Image (cartoon, coloured by chain):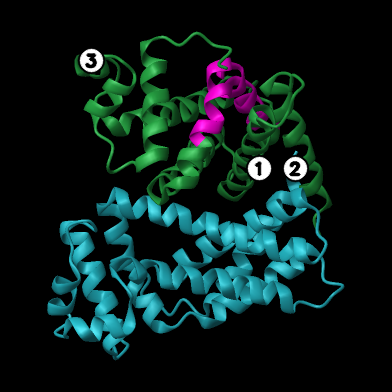
Chain colours: A cyan, B green
């Protein structure tokens, strides 16, 4: 039972992910997505340029938020503190809709090699956005790659804990979970031998 | 001018990557690949189950070698030493053919969104193989993820330096380049604040 009240755009995303899970990404058409959402094709095209954008729109937003958070960190912030600011920024924008959507997205990805590849590219895109933002601050390439790599891992772990459908209790804020995961990984990195 | 003398399998790989770069992965058929390689379709099917396997066979081998190297590291090896053993093992198996192929593979990936996604999944697969191998040694999840992440980055940097077509001089051994990249990343990780 969804706890969010979906608008047209959200209904289209839910319909699309359900169809991707059921019949694959390649075999799903815009017409089918609109029908499942009980909306018209022209409503679809008011929100998305094509089927692909259903997946890429969220990814582009996430990369942009991570980079913005890093850009906005104080000039004297260390690389890890800057990445933490990026994670904070991106986590803060994720809504109850993102959380409810997660099991559906997960099912669609599990069922589809094509979506697995797209999801992998999303992680690489997040890392690249953070590396670029860190390099703009004068951080050396190797350091930027390691810090961004920790950031991507932390966001993934935090998100998975936040969206875990087997949790009955309120998981709390995504930003807190991501910060905790980032701290664990920082500690692991500092302990590495 | 290739410095390796290609056998049938290698000719098929070169033909396939050239066609993927020219006309896309989806639009390339096994018949076209065999024709370009001046071989028959049945020769193709002696080496590969399908077009997809041209890309995945190398990826599966790489993940296996990384895991084997980690498995074979001394029981008292630290997580990073175990990852270094995995990189050593995988690097040692890469041949002059892999090196000559790299610009072609790069061109095919640049030209193709589909191949970009497949390549991203390859990095995730390498990381997952190393995480699993480290966890089998009793390494904690967070530590395994960070150590494997550094390993994937190091292999990517070492490989890029090895295969860089703009280098006139002999780049030396891939294993040395990967080890140097890994040492840089370890130092960057140790310096992170």
Q: In 3D space, how far apart are the residues under numbered discs 3 and 1 (Cα atoms)?
A: 42 Å
Are labels 1 and 2 on one chain? yes
Q: Earlier in the sequence, mark 3 or mark 1?
A: 3
User: Eyeballing the image, is B101 above or below A155?
Assistant: above
On whether residue A88 falls in the magenta region, the answer is no
Q: Residue at x 54, y 11 (%)?
A: B4
User: Eyeballing the image, is A42 above or below B172?
Assistant: below
Q: Residue at x 36, y 11 (%)?
A: B8
**What residue is pinned by disc 2?**
B185
Q: Give the structural element (helix, strand or loop) at label 2.
A: helix
Query: Which residue is more in the foreground, A147 or B46?
Result: B46
Which chain is indicated by disc 1?
B
Query: Which residue is more in the foreground, A153 or A130?
Result: A130
Can you give x and y, in whole percent of width and height, for residue A188 in the image? 68, 51
- Quadrant of res A152: bottom right
Residue B147 as seen in the image, left or right of residue B21 = right
Q: Closer to the camera: disc 3 or disc 1?
A: 3
Q: Which residues are magenta?
A: B81-105
Quarter of the picture containing the C terminus of chain B is bottom right
Label number found at residue B40: 3
Q: Give the structural element (helix, strand or loop) at label 1.
A: helix
Q: Closer to the camera: disc 2 or disc 3?
A: 3
Residue B162 as seen in the image, left or right of residue A123 = right
Are labels 3 and 1 on one chain? yes
- Label 2 near label 1: C-beta < 8 Å? yes
Q: Earlier in the sequence, mark 2 or mark 3?
A: 3
Q: Residues within 10 Å of mark 1 (few under 14, many from 20)?
A: many
Can you give x and y, in whole percent of width and height, for residue A116 in the image? 36, 52
Give the prevailing secondary structure in the magenta stretch: helix
**What residue is pinned by disc 1?**
B150
Which chain is indicated by disc 3?
B
Q: Residues within 10 Å of mark 2 (few under 14, many from 20)?
A: many
């Amino acid at each position: 039972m969804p706890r969010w009240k979906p608008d047209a755009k959200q209904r289209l995303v839910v319909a699309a992910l359900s169809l991707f899970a059921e019949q694959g990404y390649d075999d799903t058409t815009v017409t089918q997505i609109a029908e499942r959402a009980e909306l018209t094709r022209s409503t679809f095209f008011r929100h998305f340029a094509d089927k692909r954008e259903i997946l890429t729109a969220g990814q582009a937003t996430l990369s942009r938020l991570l980079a913005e958070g890093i850009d906005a960190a104080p000039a004297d912030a260390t690389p890890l503190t800057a990445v933490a600011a990026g994670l904070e920024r991106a986590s803060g924008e994720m809504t109850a809709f993102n959380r409810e959507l997660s099991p559906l997205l997960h099912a669609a990805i599990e069922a589809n090699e094509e979506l697995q590849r797209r999801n992998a590219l999303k992680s690489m895109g997040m890392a690249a956005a953070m590396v670029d933002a860190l390099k703009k601050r004068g951080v050396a390439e190797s350091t930027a790659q390691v810090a961004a790599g920790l950031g991507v891992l932390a966001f993934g772990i935090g998100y998975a804990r936040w969206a875990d459908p087997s949790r009955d209790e309120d998981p709390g804020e995504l930003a807190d979970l991501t910060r905790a995961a980032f701290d664990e990984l920082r500690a692991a990195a500092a302990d590495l031998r």
